Image: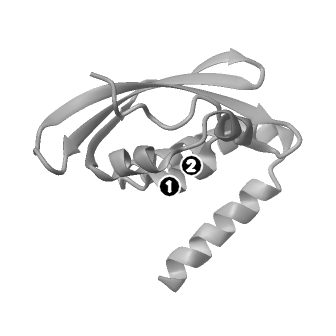
Amino acid sequence: MLRRFACFAVIAALCACATPGSKRDLLETTLQSYAAVIRWGNFEDALGFVDPATQQAHPLTALDLQRYGQVRVSGYNEQPMRPSGDNEVRQTVEITLANNNTQSVRSILDRQVWRYDEKAKRWWLVTGLPDITQH
């Protein structure tokens, strides 16, 4: 556990002192970290990747959190990211979900838009958490 924390601390420190030339590296690290959090079904931690303005405009409700708690992520298949501007990339991800109550399995498409914040020196998910109510 301590080694895992130390590894995370080193990665966080490297990200904090990222140079402009490492913006792509920071993006890849961010996307990998976000994917890992979603794969583990930890949607509350995934909220830490969402742009604060998006969170303010579309706050999660107790019902949203209950819905996330009713599913298990059984697949996360990313398509290659596509730049859509100097500080923006798009990525489509197929997320496979299993309902904890019914054991039914279905897939949703999560069309993510990530923007780089020059001031914060980090990438933010501006499209919010995956919409698991899709059919």
Mark 1, Cα crowd under 10 Å, few <14 / some 14-19 / many 20+, is some
Q: Position of residue 2 (x, y in %)?
A: 53, 84
Task: Identify the residue under disc 1.
Answer: 44
Q: Position of residue 25 (x, y in %)?
A: 67, 42
Question: Going 62% across and 42% down the picture, which residue do you hit?
Answer: 50
The numbered dot on residue 130 is: none
Q: Residue furthest bottom?
A: 2
Residues marked 2 and 1 touching at CB (< 8 Å):
yes
Amino acid type of disc 2?
Leu
Q: Does 86 sit left or right of 58 as displayed?
A: right
Q: Does 67 sit left or right of 107 as displayed?
A: right
Q: Quadrant of residue 84?
A: top right
Mark 2, Cα crowd under 10 Å, few <14 / some 14-19 / many 20+, is some
Colour theme:
one colour
Q: Position of residue 119 (x, y in %)?
A: 89, 42
- Label 2, label 1: how far apart the Cα atoms are: 5 Å
Q: Does 59 sit left or right of 79 as displayed?
A: right
Task: Identify the residue under disc 2.
Answer: 47
Residue 119 against residue 77 in the figure, above or below: below
Q: Secondary structure at mark 2?
A: helix
Q: Nearer the viewer, residue 88 or 21?
A: 88
Question: Going 11% across and 45% down the picture, which residue do you hit?
Answer: 103
Q: Quadrant of the C terminus?
A: top left
Question: Going 25% across and 29% down the picture, which residue do you hit?
Answer: 107
Q: Quadrant of residue 14?
A: bottom right
Q: Residue furthest top?
A: 84
Residue 87 against residue 74 in the figure, above or below: above
Q: Nearer the viewer, residue 69 or 119?
A: 69
Question: Going 34% across and 45% down the picture, which residue do you hit?
Answer: 67
Q: Nearer the viewer, residue 79 or 48?
A: 48
Amino acid type of disc 1?
Glu
